[in-house]
Every structure is written in structure tokens, then in C-alpha cells.
Amino acid sequence: MIVAYMTLAALVVGAAVAAVRAASLVRSAIALCVGNSSLAILFFLLKAPYAASVQLSVGAGLVSALFIIVISLTESMRGGAGEE
């Protein structure tokens, strides 16, 4: 069981590093979604189902969806991602 904890913790840290170092904002938002989902699974394994459900619904679902919507709106307002 300790291997599962360590793997999920490494995945959370790796997703956070990938979100910071990502070249595009969409990839960064997807990395944040992966990190939040991994953290929710880790909470579930640590016998905290309410924290896991809130993390999964708010962190991975709502916040990631809002990030992607805002990124797409700001890129369309700028005239596309490739024009700078």
C-alpha cells in the first residue's frame, strides 16, 4: 500500500511541475487536472472520502473546466494563439 501512496504523491508533484513548466496554458490546465485527480485518489486511499469527493468535484472538475474556458476565451479575444 505504501507503493500506491508514493506513486500518487509522485504523480501529484510531477503534475505540479509539469503545470509550471508547460509551454501552453491548455497543457498547464490539463496537468493541474491530472494533479487534482491524483490528489483526490490519494485522499480516498487515506480514508477521507468527503475530502476526496470535494477535491474531485471542485479541484479537478470545476476549476479545470473554468481554466480551459477562460484560456479559450482570452485566446479568441487576442485573435488566436499563433498571432504574436
Image (tube, rainbow, N blue to C red):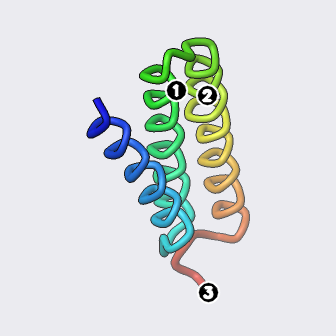
Residue 65: % across, % down: 60, 37
Q: Residues within 10 Å of mark 1 (few under 14, many from 20)?
A: some
Q: Nearer the viewer, mark 3 or mark 1?
A: 1
Residue corresponding to mark 3: 84
Closer to the camera: disc 2 or disc 1? 1
Q: Is residue 15 above or below residue 24?
A: above
> Element at badge 2?
helix
Which residue is found at the position 56% from the left and 64% from the top? 25
Q: In this picture, is 65 found above or below 1? A: below
Coordinates of residue 49 in the picture (x, y in percent)? 55, 13
Residue drawn at (62%, 13%) of the image? 50
Q: Which mark is residue 43?
A: 1
Q: Residues within 10 Å of mark 2 (few under 14, many from 20)?
A: many
Marking on residue 55: 2
Sequence-wise, the earlier of marks 2 and 1 is 1
Indicate the amino acid at tag 1.
Phe
Contact, mark 2 vs mark 1 (Cβ under 8 Å): yes
The quadrant of the picture occupied by the N terminus is top left
Q: Secondary structure under badge 3?
A: loop
Q: CA distance from mark 2 to mark 3?
A: 36 Å
